[in-house]
Image: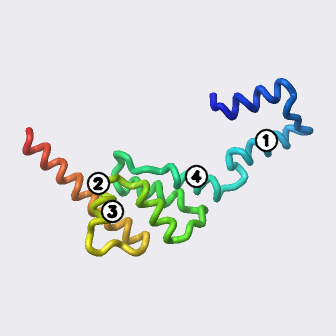
């Protein structure tokens, strides 16, 4: 169980926390976990979103889904996107002569580089085996 949940349950049991209604208690939980604020939830999702082993297209879909309602500005979106992408793809994008300026350009270039990178990996495996 989450430490926060354990602590709040213990506090409730010993009556350190008192709520007049169940609604007050639920409102406190929602505030603590961002349930009342979709924007905060989307921002938190953006912060922890990573490409890992996913295809770039899949990562971009997840990223776009998280962007909805987050109200991030364009520059901030690019920074969040760069932070979450595969390190190899990120490095190649950063080393390119002309870096993308807009988030759509980042998506397109990242997809192309990701495809090339995966194809390169498949070719390496064929040559080894």
Mark 3 or mark 4: name the one nearer the start of the chain.
Answer: 4
Mark 2 or mark 3: name the one nearer the start of the chain.
Answer: 2
Mark 2 or mark 1: name the one nearer the start of the chain.
Answer: 1
Mark 4 or mark 2: name the one nearer the start of the chain.
Answer: 4
Question: Quadrant location of residue 126?
Answer: top left
What is the count of numbered marks?
A: 4
- CA–CA distance between discs 2 and 3? 11 Å
Lateral position of residue 22 relative to residue 64, left or right: right
- From the top left corner, tell me how far across and down residue 127 is, in percent: 7, 45
- The residue drawn where x is 33% and y is 59% is 90
The disc label shown at residue 110, or none = 3
Q: Which residue is mark 2?
A: 88
Lateral position of residue 57 relative to residue 124, left or right: right
Tell us which disc is closer to us: 2 or 3: 2
- From the top left corner, tell me how far across and down residue 53 is, in percent: 34, 45
Q: Which residue is mark 1?
A: 26
Helix, strand or loop for disc 2:
helix
Q: Which residue is mark 4?
A: 44
- From the top left corner, tell me how far across and down residue 104 is, in percent: 41, 70
Helix, strand or loop for disc 3:
helix
């Amino acid at each position: 169980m989450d430490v926060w949940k354990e602590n709040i349950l213990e506090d409730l049991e010993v009556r350190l926390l008192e709520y007049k209604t169940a609604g007050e208690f639920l409102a406190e939980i929602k505030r603590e976990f961002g349930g009342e604020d979709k924007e905060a939830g989307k921002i938190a999702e953006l912060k922890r979103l990573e490409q890992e082993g996913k295809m770039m297209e899949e990562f971009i879909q997840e990223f776009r889904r998280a962007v909805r309602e987050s109200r991030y500005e364009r520059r901030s979106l690019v920074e969040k996107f760069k932070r979450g992408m595969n390190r190899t793809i990120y490095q190649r994008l950063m080393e390119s002569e002309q870096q993308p300026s807009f988030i759509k350009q980042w998506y397109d270039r990242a997809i192309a580089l990701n495809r090339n990178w995966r194809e390169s990996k498949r070719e390496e495996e064929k040559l080894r085996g």
